Image (spheres, coloured by chain):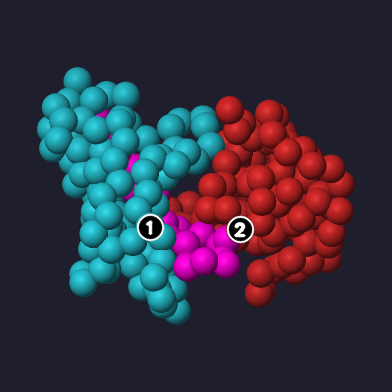
């Protein structure tokens, strides 16, 4: 069935370190891919998205590229900040006509000064 | 914009009682609202989808008589956990979207339910 697998956390990095959070998916058709972020005490927020193969989503210095050949959507940031500490969720939505999101388990990131 | 609130943020109730969780879209009209459940270190699992003025659509395995959902207005949906048991303890999250088929869901901060 449909599923999302993302690297388990928690991940602890020093400020200005490089971040990669791996995400792979199993889906039929041509899904849209998302990364959501949840800051402490807040709801999930859409961080970035990509709707077709080879698209690159980017926001706030984060990037992820839709790789259909490897069914992956890894999240990267070149230099993390303390304010990036949060839980990151990879998700996908099946093609047109579907509203349902399938989420990964989330990866908690802690950035220390 | 697109703020969703949930109330309460935390609730503790005794086994056998019922508890109601509210989900409100504060600055937009939500034709569709979603209820999720999240166990520790697990994914968000969709429980049900509700459209304003209609009966909710429940996912397979979710007991509709236990998890009552009401979406009486375009800004409010409620989830009532009836006759709660300790295994119902979880983190409940709602989201809202302006239309049924948009990918953009705006999430509430969640409600931590503990049943003793």
Examine the residues drawn in magenta and state their main secondary structure: strand
Q: Quarter of the image for the N terminus of chain A: give it.
A: bottom left
Q: Quarter of the image for the C terminus of chain A: give it.
A: top left
Residue that badge 1 annotates? A51
Q: Secondary structure at mark 2?
A: loop
Residue that badge 2 annotates? B101
Tell me the subunit letter for badge 1.
A
Of the chain colours in the picture, the one used for chain B is red
Q: Is residue A94 above or below residue B36?
A: below
Q: Is residue A22 above or below residue A95?
A: above
Residue B84 seen: no
Residue under the image location 60 percent in, 38 percent down: B108
Q: Position of residue B56 (x, y in %)?
A: 78, 61
Q: Which chain is cyan?
A: A
Residue B44 appears left or right of B81: left
Instruction: Pick whichever, B77 or B21, lies toward us.
Output: B77
Residue lying at the far top of the rendered structure: A113
| Magenta-tinted stretch | A87-111
Residue under the image location 66 percent in, 74 percent down: B60
Same chain under badges 2 and 1? The reply is: no
Residue under the image location 14 percent in, 27 percent down: A16
């Amino acid at each position: 069935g449909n599923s999302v697998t993302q690297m388990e956390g928690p991940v602890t990095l020093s400020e200005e370190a490089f971040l990669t959070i791996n995400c792979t998916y199993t889906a039929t058709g041509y899904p849209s891919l998302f990364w959501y972020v949840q800051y402490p005490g807040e709801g999930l927020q859409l961080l970035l998205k990509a709707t077709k193969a080879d698209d690159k989503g980017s926001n706030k210095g984060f990037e992820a590229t839709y790789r259909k050949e490897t069914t992956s959507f890894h999240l990267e940031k070149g230099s993390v900040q303390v304010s990036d500490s949060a839980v990151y969720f990879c998700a996908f939505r099946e093609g047109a006509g579907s509203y349902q999101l399938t989420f990964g388990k989330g990866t908690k990131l802690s950035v220390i000064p | 914009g697109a703020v969703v609130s949930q109330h309460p943020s935390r609730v503790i109730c005794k086994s056998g009682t019922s508890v109601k969780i509210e989900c409100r879209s504060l600055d937009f009209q939500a034709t569709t609202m979603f209820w999720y459940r999240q166990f520790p270190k697990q994914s968000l699992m969709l429980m049900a989808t509700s459209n304003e003025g209609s009966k909710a659509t429940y996912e397979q395995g979710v007991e509709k008589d236990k998890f009552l959902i009401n979406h009486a207005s375009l800004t409010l949906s409620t989830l009532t956990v009836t006759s709660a048991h300790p295994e119902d303890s979880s983190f409940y999250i709602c989201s809202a979207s302006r239309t049924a088929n948009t990918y953009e869901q705006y999430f509430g901060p969640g409600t931590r339910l503990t049943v003793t």
